[in-house]
């Protein structure tokens, strides 16, 4: 092949460590934020009142049907023009990531609840439970077990989504690697190494996800 | 005790109930029979307000509710209170799978009536003993047979101490061998003076236990009377056709 491999480009331990920290921070933060937003919106989607469901549907469809990259860029470049206020890179990207995650989590939540057999609703109502009581005691305990695998799956996807932070120069793994490539002209070694790092971060998560699925599959 | 006057339920163009009027005195067992699609289940669900009747009146104990234009259905707390006063047992049991048998029976009084846990547990124990399932207290519904699950469902409905019990084809989903144990419980409840409306295909049970029987067809009661009149000497030709198998197969006990 004639290519001389030179892995010295990647030997910057502290740089990679910081990058991993940033990636994990954004992943965990936006997954948590997204699940909270998604939980609230999921409840909203289950309402019978159109004035509640219509705006929530609008939000969910908007963020599911546009690319995350476009969302991050829009929050960073376009929103400040409307607000006449410049958003820092970390906030614009965190906002984009959280709202993106929230839209998917809302659908996972709604799907989980709706998948519970209608007979459960009837039996709970027949006992005289109010909507709140039957959701808390009967439906949600069953529905959350069903939601766990898709939630974990979505979390794994979100960690990969954080790679889009590079577009607003947040120093996560992807941005850091592009900087190193720019300095060392070693894209093969650097990008191969970063792919390996993502894999090492994510593989335990997928193993954990499978274990959780087995546990809930009683 | 429980009366309906001209109860109607329409789903779009389909008239599921076309003016059903019945009256059940306290302590009576009222059996509803009829072919599939005649509206028996719809009738029970309307009485329980699991569906909103299109028009008519329902009276249960002291509550009288009128339906139709200009009469909004009760909602929220009032609706929950009304439903708590009527027990319902479903064909598909609908036990709560994430709770044990004891917890299933307890959950009504504990959550709806805000009973203390120990009291609710005691009540649940008594009721499970009454249906013959004391040894299954800590078993989950997935590990119960159909007959056992249905008996837990009956105990669960009884826990709310309702004025009326509604039974919607409660043995139709069971193996023939398991039907007997559930019917035994129903017979015992009837003997104790529980007011019951039972939708069933078990004609022998109806003949033995019912005070009144009505035959429904296409959303209307077409024949009504006491058990021997309706089951053994039906006047309506449709009822005669429906019951001919019962008569023909020899109504052995």
Image (spheres, rainbow, N blue to C red):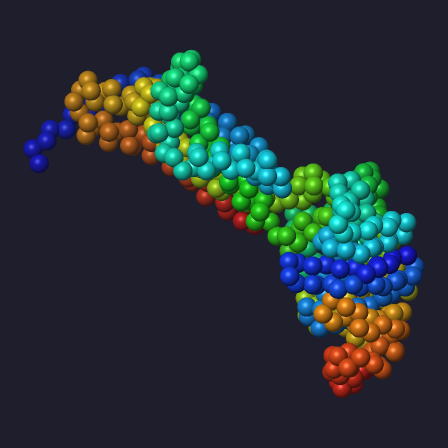
Give me the residue at 59% from left, 35% from top.
Answer: A52
> In this view of the protein, can residue A145 be seen by the observer?
no
Q: Seen in the image, is A137 located left or right of residue A191? A: right
Looking at the image, residue B36 lies above or below residue A82 = below
Q: In what quadrant of the picture does the C terminus of chain B appear?
A: bottom right
Nearest the eye: B161 or A110: A110
> In this view of the protein, can residue B68 be seen by the observer?
yes
Q: Seen in the image, is A155 located left or right of residue A126? A: left
Give me the residue at 83% from left, 81% from top.
Answer: B235
- Residue A215 in picture, x, y percent from top left: 53, 45
Single out the residue that lies furthest toward the left.
A2
Give me the residue at 69% from left, 38% from top.
Answer: A132
Q: Seen in the image, is A54 located left or right of residue B110? A: left
Q: In what quadrant of the picture does the N terminus of chain B appear?
A: bottom right
Give me the residue at 21% from left, 22% from top.
Answer: A181
Q: Seen in the image, is A28 located left or right of residue B208? A: left
- Residue A129 in picture, x, y percent from top left: 74, 44
Looking at the image, residue B149 lies above or below residue A145 = below
- Residue B173 in picture, x, y percent from top left: 68, 66
Looking at the image, residue B204 lies above or below residue A171 = below
Quadrant of the image occupied by residue A216: top right
Quadrant of the image occupied by residue B148: bottom right
- Residue A57 in picture, x, y percent from top left: 51, 38
């Amino acid at each position: 092949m004639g290519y001389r491999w030179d892995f010295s480009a990647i030997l910057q331990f502290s740089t990679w460590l910081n990058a991993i920290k940033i990636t994990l921070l954004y992943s965990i933060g936006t997954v948590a934020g997204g699940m909270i937003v998604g939980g609230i919106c999921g409840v909203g989607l289950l309402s019978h009142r159109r004035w509640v469901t219509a705006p929530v549907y609008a939000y969910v469809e908007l963020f599911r049907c546009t690319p995350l990259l476009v969302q991050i860029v829009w929050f960073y470049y376009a929103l400040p023009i409307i607000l006449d206020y410049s958003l820092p890179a970390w906030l614009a990207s965190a906002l984009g990531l959280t709202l993106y995650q929230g839209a998917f989590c809302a659908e996972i939540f709604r799907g989980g609840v709706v998948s519970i057999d209608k007979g459960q609703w009837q039996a709970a109502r027949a006992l005289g439970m109010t909507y709140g009581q039957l959701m808390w005691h009967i439906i949600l305990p069953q529905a959350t077990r069903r939601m766990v695998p898709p939630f974990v799956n979505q979390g794994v996807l979100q960690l990969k989504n954080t790679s889009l932070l590079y577009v607003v120069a947040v120093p996560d793994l992807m941005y850091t690697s592009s900087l190193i490539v720019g300095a060392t002209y070693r894209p093969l070694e650097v990008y191969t190494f970063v792919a390996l790092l993502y894999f090492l971060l994510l593989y335990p998560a997928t193993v954990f996800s499978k274990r959780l699925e087995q546990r809930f599959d009683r | 005790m429980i009366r309906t006057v001209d109860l109607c339920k329409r789903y779009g163009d389909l008239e599921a109930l076309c003016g059903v009027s019945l009256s059940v005195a306290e302590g009576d067992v009222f059996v509803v029979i009829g072919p599939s699609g005649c509206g028996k289940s719809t009738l029970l669900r309307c009485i329980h307000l699991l569906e909103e009747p299109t028009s008519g009146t329902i009276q249960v104990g002291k509550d009288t509710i009128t339906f139709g234009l200009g009469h909004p259905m009760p909602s929220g707390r009032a609706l929950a209170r009304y439903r708590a006063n009527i027990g319902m047992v479903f064909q598909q049991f609908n036990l709560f799978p994430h709770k044990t048998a004891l917890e299933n029976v307890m959950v009504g009084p504990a959550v709806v009536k805000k009973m203390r846990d120990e009291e609710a547990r005691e009540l649940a124990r008594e009721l499970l003993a009454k249906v013959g399932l004391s040894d299954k207290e800590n078993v989950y519904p997935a590990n119960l047979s159909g007959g056992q699950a249905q008996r837990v469902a009956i105990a669960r409905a009884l826990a709310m101490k309702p004025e009326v019990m509604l039974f919607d084809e409660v043995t139709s989903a069971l193996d023939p061998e398991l039907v007997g144990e559930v019917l035994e419980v129903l017979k015992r409840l009837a003997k104790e003076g529980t007011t019951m409306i039972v939708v069933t295909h078990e004609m022998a049970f109806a003949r033995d236990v019912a005070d009144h029987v009505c035959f429904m067809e296409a959303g209307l009661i077409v024949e009504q009377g006491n058990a021997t009149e309706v089951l053994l000497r039906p006047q309506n030709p449709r009822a005669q056709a429906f019951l001919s198998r019962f008569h023909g197969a020899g109504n052995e006990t």
